[in-house]
Amino acid sequence: MSKKSAALEAKFEIAVKTLLKAPNLTVQEAMLVAKFSTKDIENKSMQKIIARRIPGGKRAMAALLPPALLPPSIVIDVPRCHSPQISNLTTLSGATEISGHIQPPKRKQQKMTTRALQQKRVEDLKQKRHKVDVHKEAVRLYMHEMEKPEGARMSSRQVQDHIQKKYRGVGPSFSTINRYAKEGLVNVSPKKMGKSGNLSEGTYKLLCEALSSLIPINGMNARSGDNSRKKLTTVLVKTMDMETSEAGKLLDRLLRDTAQDIHAEKLNCAEDRRVRWTTYQNLKLWFDSWEKFLVEFGFATYDTDGELVIDAELMHRILNMGETCISLDGSNGNRGGRPTVTYYDIRFPQLGRATSKSALTTTMISGSNSAGEPIPPHFQFQTAAQTDEAKAVRVETIRYTLDVQATFGHEEVQSFPISIGLNSKGGWTTTNFLSTSKSQS
């Protein structure tokens, strides 16, 4: 830093200290104390530099600090020294101390997730409805007291004190109670503040009812994917003939006022055929058939109490296999990204979104037997090759894989390697199942 710049910086420091000590001075008077030249004092840019260095600006400092005892016309001589007389101290909590006054720490703005925001809406709606009930009770009580003879009834102030004592500080003021009673607004919710919107009260109530019905209907029909914010906004755009930005604001209001039973969660995806099959009748039929199969083929017997018992050695021969897609980015389909957050009604089961069987992800098949031994995983990759000679897999795919130690139907523990297959869709077929089972046996 040059000598000229250092001297100018020292003048800035003296001007700032002067304003902190005597906030009723103007910036130009503080610059005069710091011995700026007449040209510099009239320079608007230099005045702004000094004003920006005062925490909260000069007006904020004038509100926090006591006014100076000296009149503005008296020039204060502030000595130049490296150790400032007025220091800014920061406490452990983040609060800043300026000349004996403590400023609270600045609150950091944090963006809430969709799930957390919807949960906040749920809690806010509970508090709002509680205040509405208290408001109605206060007006009803005051109207009831007005029917009593004078001298034996409570005033509006006494009604206010009674209600707020009963509900621990929650309740309308006596002036509000008086106003609603004079207007005859008994059992009426508090009026909303602000100007009237473009939608009538009846139209808005119909939209709330429609949203409260649409979300559970989509969920029960395995179309929870249509309950995402993006698709609900699109529905409002087409229904109300409005811009996307306005539809987003309207959706926020609808979600706020219907948040009692509407929650938000990441969507669980499932195949369409699985979603439609998982009914109580089908599940009960499957387990009953499984029980008969075990007894018929000698895997299990009934004990004296009629309970099904499976022999410990035969547990190694009962396998449970399943398939899943492998995705490194959290997606389960043809595009990347995180799972979509959707809205659902907590009073109904969340079935998830029906998805297609085809995808560009890799399929992995694995499982275990009833004894807890793992089944060697099988990886099914997608390929465009039409012949077996053209199909190829990189060696790095299996270089670091480990074998699986298990017994299954053998007399001793055996070592089983993983297996790899390729087809046009990267899916699991009956042919793959039979060939893989034979290779692992």
Image: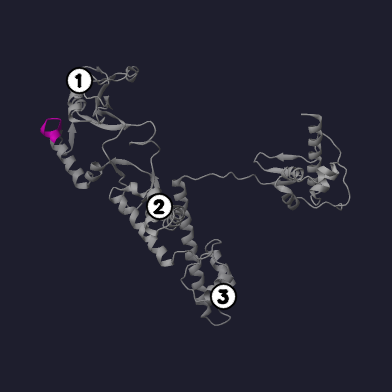
Does 297 lie within the magenta span?
A: yes
- Callout 2: 10 Å neighbours few (<14), some, many (20+)? many
Q: Is residue 396 visible?
A: yes
Q: In x, y percent, where is residue 294?
A: 15, 33
- Judging by the rendered image, the residue that carries numbered circle 2 is 233
Which quadrant: the C terminus? top left
- Callout 1: 10 Å neighbours few (<14), some, many (20+)? few
User: Left or right: 72 with respect to 233?
Assistant: right
Q: Which of marks 2 and 1 is nearer the N terminus?
A: 2
For this orientation, the residue located farthest to the front is: 39
Distance CA(mark 2)–CA(mark 1)? 52 Å
Q: Give the residue type at disc 3.
A: Met
Range covered by the magenta-colored residues: 293-300
Kind of element beneath mark 3: loop
Q: In x, y percent, where is residue 66?
A: 79, 52
- Judging by the rendered image, the residue that carries numbered circle 3 is 154
The residue that appears at 41% across and 67% down in the rendered structure is 202
Q: Give the residue type at disc 1.
A: Ser
Q: Quadrant of residue 268?
A: top left
145 and 30: which one is in front?
Answer: 30
- Callout 3: 10 Å neighbours few (<14), some, many (20+)? some
Kind of element beneath mark 2: helix
Q: Is residue 174 above or below residue 109?
A: below
- Judging by the rendered image, the residue that carries numbered circle 1 is 439
- The image's mark for residue 331 is none
374 and 269: which one is in front?
Answer: 269
